Amino acid sequence: MTLLEGRGLTKKFGGVVAIEDVSFTVERGEAVGLIGPNGAGKSTLFRTITGVHPPTEGEVYFDGDEITGKSQHEICHRGLAKTHQIVRPFESLSLLENVVVGAEYGGREFDDTRARAREMLEFVDLGDQMHADPGELSVGGLKRLEIARVLATDPEMVLFDEVAGGLDPEETEGIIDLVGDIVDEGKTVFLIDHVMRALMSVSERVMVLDNGKLIAEGTPDEIQNDDEVIEAYLGE
Ligand code: ADP
Ligand code: MG
């Protein structure tokens, strides 16, 4: 059953066409990867889906309802959450307090929001640092904090925007394992990376965006052997 669908999504910024006529579906429980060279429009697609900005044309459906143009907050409340490519926690709050804010933003009622935030920090392996400040974290730690923040909203589906971006191979592997655990828990996942390697292991299906257009879709194996995809990357 389809959980998320985009129909004919186009987003223009003045004269720049960031994405053009993009249509796709993600099934409930699926893990789908989105790859494409820098500037292909990946983050714009995710922002258009999650209400950061409305599409210029096209529609978005989540769980059977049209959500086009709805606010980020409302979309998150419906169970569709996104990590930010650039993580900007509240520097004056502890990790725990940052995740509490995330849990409250999601608008769900929890018996104990702090307990939920603690549980999420433990899940991402930051449990022993929950009273530290975000400034003490490595880049990988910040990505984990961002994942905890998003999970605290109790989403049904998570969009990850380059959650392994800028990490060394060991940190990347740790984060990808974490995404795998989230998939195993039954959440639907749509994740961006601009390098194929990282997301191939968790994605059942991969879509490729180049110059704002979807140019290929298939299993990780099919995508890695697709001539058009190889060419898009060689031109980078
Ligand atoms: P990717 O995430 O694949 O690297 P982006 O979605 O960030 O690509 O960007 C796609 C194109 O849209 C780029 O040309 C970028 O400069 C442009 N773009 C993205 N966001 C904005 C914005 N808020 N204002 C103007 N141009 C933007
Ligand atoms: Mg991006």
Image: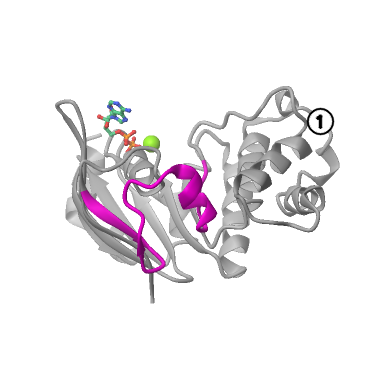
Q: Residue furthest bottom?
A: 1
Across and down, in percent, residue 118 comes to 80, 49
Q: Is residue 197 above or below residue 98?
A: below
Residue 204 relative to residue 223: left or right: right
User: Residue at position x 36%, y 49% from top?
Assistant: 49
Magenta segment, which residues?
58-83
Q: Is residue 8 above or below residue 194?
A: below
Across and down, in percent, residue 50 comes to 41, 47
Q: Nearer the viewer, residue 19 or 80?
A: 80
Q: Residues within 10 Å of mark 1 (few under 14, many from 20)?
A: some
Q: Quadrant of residue 3?
A: bottom left
Q: Is residue 17 above or below residue 126?
A: above
Q: Quadrant of residue 220?
A: bottom left
User: Residue at position x 34%, y 67% from top?
Assistant: 219
Q: Quadrant of the C terminus?
A: top left
Q: Quadrant of the N terminus?
A: bottom left
Q: Give the amino acid type for the residue marked by disc 1 in the picture.
A: Ala
Across and down, in percent, residue 20 comes to 17, 45
Q: Nearer the viewer, residue 67 or 10?
A: 67
Residue at image mark 1:
132
Residue 149 relative to residue 132: left or right: left
Image quarter for ligand 2: top left
User: Residue at position x 37%, y 40% from top?
Assistant: 43
